Image (cartoon, rainbow, N blue to C red):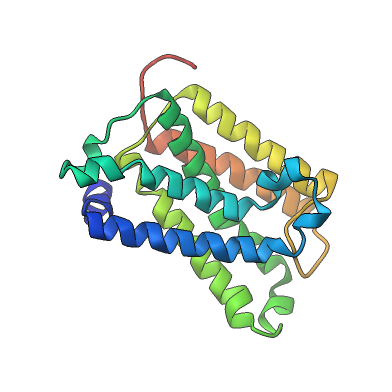
Amino acid sequence: MRDAVAEELLGEPRSLVVTLALTAFMFLIGVDYYAGTLGEVPTVLWPLYADSAVAVALGALSLATLLPTVGSGDPVAETPTNRALAYLHTLSFVWLVQFGLWPLVSLNLAFESYVIAPDAWIYYWGVLGTHLCFVGLALLFPAFGRTTRGALAVAGALGVANVVVDYWVGYYPPLLYEPGVGLALATLGIAALSVWLASRSFRRLDEDPA
């Protein structure tokens, strides 16, 4: 089922380009969301701070690796892979799932504040809808990608680093409330779930632990 959907959405040059264009659009929206506060965050921490935008950028990179295969007319599932691509696709998957699910928790912890806020249709319903699209996109990646234990370990370590930067150092995404321990623990749980799902969804590149 997954492979058939991936072939339908990504297996033709036109549909792949449209998907890339939509991904680029979501990236620009994400950049706009974080742009006003990036100046308050050390540059080296931007990738962990602007997490949703980075997730979409990684997803776009993963999709771009399909261009040679799709352009040649080969099935998406036959896209060549290697260790570097296994790391890219794994991290893209984990980041998209993690930050696709994160708003379900973060926004609903202050549900009333968001649904009565001006432009709630964008900042609540719009955010939830677009971020769930992250998850749908990520679930297609195992149709053409592979993973390794090393890639899963790196993705997990970055998930923990994100929680540290957001909730211990204090550089969390713009919210309408001050997050506490509950959101930090929930974010850590979502990160663990995302890595577990990647482990279950991707085929292994080989048995090399790196």
Q: Position of residue 42 (x, y in %)?
A: 80, 45
Query: From the viewer's perspective, is 33 left or right of 8?
Result: right
Residue drawn at 67 percent across, 49 percent down: 187
Q: Position of residue 110 (x, y in %)?
A: 73, 70
Query: From the viewer's perspective, is 125 left or right of 87?
Result: right
Q: Does residue 45 lie above or below 148 as drawn? A: below
Query: From the viewer's perspective, is 44 left or right of 203?
Result: right
Residue drawn at 41 percent across, 31 percent down: 85
Q: Using the image as rendered, state which of residue 62 and residue 189 is in the foreground.
A: 62
Residue drawn at 52 percent across, 42 percent down: 94
Residue drawn at 74 percent across, 77 percent down: 113
Query: From the viewer's perspective, is 138 left or right of 69?
Result: right
Q: Position of residue 93 (x, y in %)?
A: 47, 43
The image shows a total of numbered marks equal to 0
Observer able to see residue 6: yes
Residue 156, image quadrant: top right
Q: Position of residue 106 (x, y in %)?
A: 68, 61
Q: Does residue 188 lie above or below 210 as drawn? A: below
Find the residue positioned furthest to the left: 73
Observer able to see residue 180: no
